Image (tube, rainbow, N blue to C red):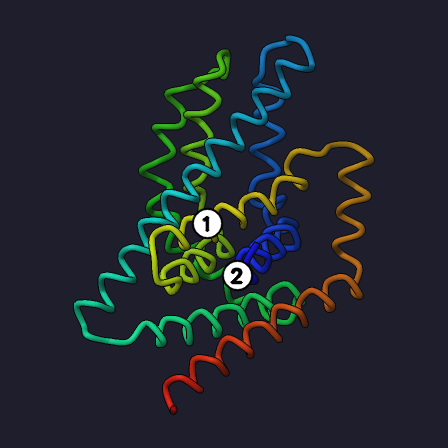
Amino acid sequence: MTPDLLAALLIGFLGSSHCLVMCGGIVAALQLALPQRSFSWKLTMQLLLSLGRLTTYALLGGLVGYFGMQAMALAGVSLIWLRLVAGLLLLLMALYIARLWFGLTLLERGGQHLWALIRPLSQKVMPLDSLPKAYLYGLCWGWLPCGLVYSTLGWSLASGSAGQGALIMLFFGLGTLPALLTFGSLASNLSKFKNKPLVRYSAACILAIYGIYTIYLALKRLVF
């Protein structure tokens, strides 16, 4: 696993506290909307919902990664500049995870207009009484406005390829799964662990160091 994918996984895992704020209500509502069937059936539905969301993340990551690569090629600009942007975004996400700066949440306002177009589509598959409907709802769920998702998409834009952009978003989504698939005492203990200052600051430092290292390598190649 590359450092970029490890960083994406870490961002998803530690940033999923915000995911619970954004998506926790949806998860709870979906739990109530699921028909009263066996635990294994409900678990399968939850997994398909998450699979749909991760599919959307990966597709969006691939699209913006391809767009970033093509834009740089058309402009005749070196891909090194994209790595510089990627390093700066990592620093911003490190500040967010450390809870020292919440500017990423401002991006959610812009996404509200897009979500207004997607939300009616998600309502058409309700109630969630079949496995295909769960996956389709998950595809729509991936469009829910989230500053951390948008920032990671910006990082995918700077990844330099469609494949790498898709993988970054996929691993980010995988990092959010523990928070969204756990319930009860397990979810509470996981949340307490992630919210410990030592955990948050340590992870933020790791991301910041990797961001600075990414910027250093980009500047080094630009200068020399």
**x, y (%) of residue 143?**
41, 42
Q: CA distance from mark 2 to mark 1?
A: 9 Å
Q: Which quarter of the figure has residue 203?
A: bottom right
Q: Nearer the viewer, residue 138 or 123?
A: 138
Check disc 1 and report its element: helix, strand or loop.
helix
Report crowding for label 1: few under 14, some 14 to 19, many 20 or more residues within 10 A (C-alpha). many
Q: Which quarter of the figure has residue 80?
A: bottom left
For the residue marked with disc 1, what is the amino acid?
A: Leu
Residue at image x 50%, y 32%?
A: 51
Q: Quadrant of the N terminus?
A: bottom right
Q: Quadrant of the C terminus?
A: bottom left
Q: Which quarter of the figure has residue 100?
A: bottom right
Residue at image x 40%, y 84%?
A: 221
- Numbered tag placed on residue 167 in the rendering: 1
Q: How many marks?
A: 2
Residue at image x 80%, y 50%?
A: 192
Q: In the picture shown, does residue 220 fall above or below 32?
A: below
Check disc 2 and report its element: helix, strand or loop.
helix
Instruction: Check contact, mark 2 vs mark 1: CB within 8 A.
Output: yes
Q: In the picture shown, does residue 178 fall above or below 129?
A: below
Q: Is residue 100 toward the left or the right of residue 49 in the image?
A: right
- Numbered tag placed on residue 55 in the rendering: none
**x, y (%) of residue 24?**
62, 38
Disc 2 designates what residue?
4
Q: In the picture shown, does residue 179 fall above or below 99?
A: above
